[in-house]
Image: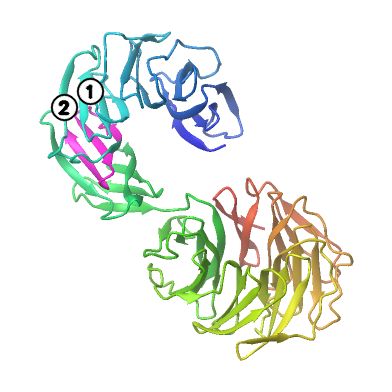
């Protein structure tokens, strides 16, 4: 289930996370496999907050009749009734010292306050000042103030002990975010300033005493992707979270970004290497360049594939990156910069996959509508219509042969001459019994391997009859195989599967199925793998993670 909220306890020992089904898990921050508590809080969890002593948790969201639950971190018992709203709850926060106080805000445009433990609704506080959703409620670290920020662009301050006494109003039509929605808010550690993030793509720091904006950080100039939806006030920096998932560290003096951490907030579809540098693409039309030493990612800028899923990526002989997406276009991008290529090369339909050459800038696009499109030096040189649905493929080491796997368990081989495809004399005798999902040639040109969704792996010699060298095929994965690649020295073959494992096949001389299995590798399954060198494998998975494995 999708996780909507996760918060670390003040003592740094535990994490409480809540999901779309209203389930809350409390688990060890150093031992994610250790679950301390599991509680059904409501129908859907939107927000979570810890009490200052790390002994109580409140999880709030949507449900009927229960929209929230306060409970001990190690028990499912109730710490009182959180019932001050008639619509789903958006935000919640505990105060920082005794006596305990809890504040919540909801889609009913109300802010509610609860006192003591067990919590009890404070009927004296109406909390109806916002004209639009109140997206954030926060007590100051010293508990002197309760601040609320909403989609109306306004911030209200209340007395932390007597919330019925409204103290100040910040922002408005001509001040601060100027009626742009405020999505997030955080107090400074000394309780003298507030930082807010907004749909105007800025983070603003307010002086509580003067009610004025003293700092303004601009995350972007256009587009909804730079809406500021999360904030953390660190000792020397302010960190904000953009709607696109990037984390930005802001310097207070220069009001400039000192670092931006980027990654994939949506499904990763492929990874590739160019000159030892890793690149990944995903469903959110993002291509990311990764620093292998620090693990930091940099996004390529530009329209890319017009915000549509990038289905596959590969590296050409020149080192340039080839990508295909659901805009039915091929783009060839120079990795030396960080800008997507604006040149569009028609793929001829929906691209199921992509294969790139080894000796020239040649690539083959496998089109779901029964086509194989060949592109050489950025020009379409051939479009071969076939009577099957091509799913995957690979070029031989010398680029003279192209293997294409289809959905009916057949591997088709074509001779490549001057950018054209012709039927090759080499035929495949292996029968997969299902769709061929992956294909690969060994770098030394001696072997070609194919793998199917029916879990079988066939390896054939390129100079023989096409009969499998590994007898009836290896079938050690427990689910469909999704990817495969030979090691740079051609001595090993690695395969990834939906069974969340990768298997490294070590014997490509006697073919006795000697192998090493790495499991669990990725939650949900392995999407793609590449060899960094003959002892290092990089994998991407359904869990939106990229991992490096040392054999």
Q: What secondary structure predominates along the stretch shown in magenta?
A: strand
- Left or right of 187: which side holds 298? right
In terms of image quadrants, where is residue 46? top left
| Residue 42, position as x, y percentages in the image | 51, 22
In terms of image quadrants, where is residue 92? top left
| Residue 119, position as x, y percentages in the image | 40, 10
Q: Identify the residue at horizontal 85%, vertical 71% (top origin).
A: 468
Q: Mark 2–mark 1 contact, CB under 8 Å? A: yes
- Left or right of 473: which side holds 351? left
Which one is nearer the viewer's eye here, 461 or 169?
169
Numbered marks: total: 2
Q: Identify the residue at horizontal 33%, vertical 17% (top origin).
A: 112
> Which contiguous range is marked in magenta?
184-208
Q: Secondary structure at mark 2?
A: strand
| Residue 57, position as x, y percentages in the image | 46, 20
Can residue 188 be found in the magenta stretch?
A: yes
Can residue 445 be found in the magenta stretch?
A: no
Which one is nearer the viewer's eye here, 226 or 172?
172
Q: Identify the residue at horizontal 27%, vertical 48% (top origin).
A: 201
Q: Identify the residue at horizontal 63%, vertical 48% (top origin).
A: 522
| Residue 9, position as x, y percentages in the image | 44, 27
- Left or right of 208: which side holds 472? right
Display colour scheme: rainbow
Q: Where does label 1 land, which residue?
A: 129
Q: Residues within 10 Å of mark 2 (few under 14, many from 20)?
A: some
Q: Where does label 2 land, which residue?
A: 169
Q: Quadrant of the C terminus?
A: bottom right
Give the spatial CA distance, label 2 vs label 1. 10 Å
Which one is nearer the viewer's eye here, 354 or 550?
354
């Amino acid at each position: 289930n999708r996780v909507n909220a996760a918060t670390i306890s003040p003592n740094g020992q535990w994490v409480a996370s809540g999901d779309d089904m209203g389930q809350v898990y409390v688990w060890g921050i150093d031992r994610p496999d250790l679950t301390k508590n599991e509680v059904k809080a409501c129908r859907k969890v939107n927000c979570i907050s810890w009490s200052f002593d790390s002994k109580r948790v409140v999880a709030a969201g949507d449900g009927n009749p229960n929209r929230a639950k306060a409970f001990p971190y190690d028990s499912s018992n109730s710490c009182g009734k959180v019932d001050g709203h008639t619509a789903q709850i958006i935000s919640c926060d505990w105060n920082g010292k005794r006596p305990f106080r809890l504040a919540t805000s909801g889609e009913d445009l109300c802010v509610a306050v609860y006192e003591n433990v067990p919590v009890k609704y404070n009927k004296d506080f109406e909390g109806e000042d916002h004209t639009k959703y109140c997206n954030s409620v926060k007590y100051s670290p010293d508990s002197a103030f309760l601040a609320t920020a909403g989609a109306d662009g306004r911030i209200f301050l209340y007395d932390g002990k007597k919330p019925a006494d409204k103290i100040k109003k910040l922002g408005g039509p001509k001040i601060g975010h100027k009626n742009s929605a405020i999505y997030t808010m955080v107090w400074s550690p000394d309780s003298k300033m507030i930082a807010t993030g907004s749909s105007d793509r800025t983070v603003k720091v307010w002086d509580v005493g003067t009610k004025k904006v003293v700092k303004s950080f601009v995350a972007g100039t256009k587009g909804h992707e730079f809406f500021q939806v999360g904030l953390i006030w660190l000792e020397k920096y302010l960190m904000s979270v953009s709607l696109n998932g990037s984390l930005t560290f802001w310097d207070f003096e220069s009001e400039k970004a000192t670092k931006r951490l980027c990654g994939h907030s949506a499904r990763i579809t492929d990874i590739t290497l160019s000159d030892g540098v890793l690149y990944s693409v995903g469903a959110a039309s993002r291509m990311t360049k990764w620093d292998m030493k620090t693990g930091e990612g940099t996004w390529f800028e530009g329209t890319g594939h017009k915000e549509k899923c990038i289905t596959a990526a590969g590296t050409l002989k020149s080192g340039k990156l080839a990508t295909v997406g659901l805009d039915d276009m091929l783009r060839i991008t120079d990795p030396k910069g960080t800008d997507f290529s604006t040149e569009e090369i028609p793929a001829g339909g929906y691209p199921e996959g992509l294969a790139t050459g080894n000796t020239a800038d040649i690539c083959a696009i496998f089109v779901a509508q029964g086509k194989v499109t060949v592109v050489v030096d950025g020009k379409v040189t051939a479009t071969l219509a076939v009577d099957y649905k091509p799913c995957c493929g690979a070029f031989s080491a010398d680029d003279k042969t192209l293997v294409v796997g289809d959905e009916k368990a057949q591997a088709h081989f074509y001779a490549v001459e001057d950018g054209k495809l012709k039927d090759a004399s080499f035929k495949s005798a292996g029968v997969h019994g299902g769709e061929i999902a992956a294909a690969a040639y060994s770098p030394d040109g001696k072997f070609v391997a194919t793998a199917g969704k029916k879990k079988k792996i066939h390896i054939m010699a390129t100079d023989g009859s096409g009969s499998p060298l590994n007898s009836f095929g290896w079938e050690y994965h427990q689910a469909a195989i999704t990817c495969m690649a030979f090691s740079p020295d051609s001595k090993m073959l690695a395969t990834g599967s939906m069974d969340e494992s990768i298997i490294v096949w070590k014997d490509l001389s006697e073919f006795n199925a000697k192998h090493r299995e790495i499991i669990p590798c990725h939650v949900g399954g392995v999407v793609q793998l590449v060899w960094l060198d003959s002892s290092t494998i990089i994998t991407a998975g359904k869990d939106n993670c990229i991992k490096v494995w040392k054999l």
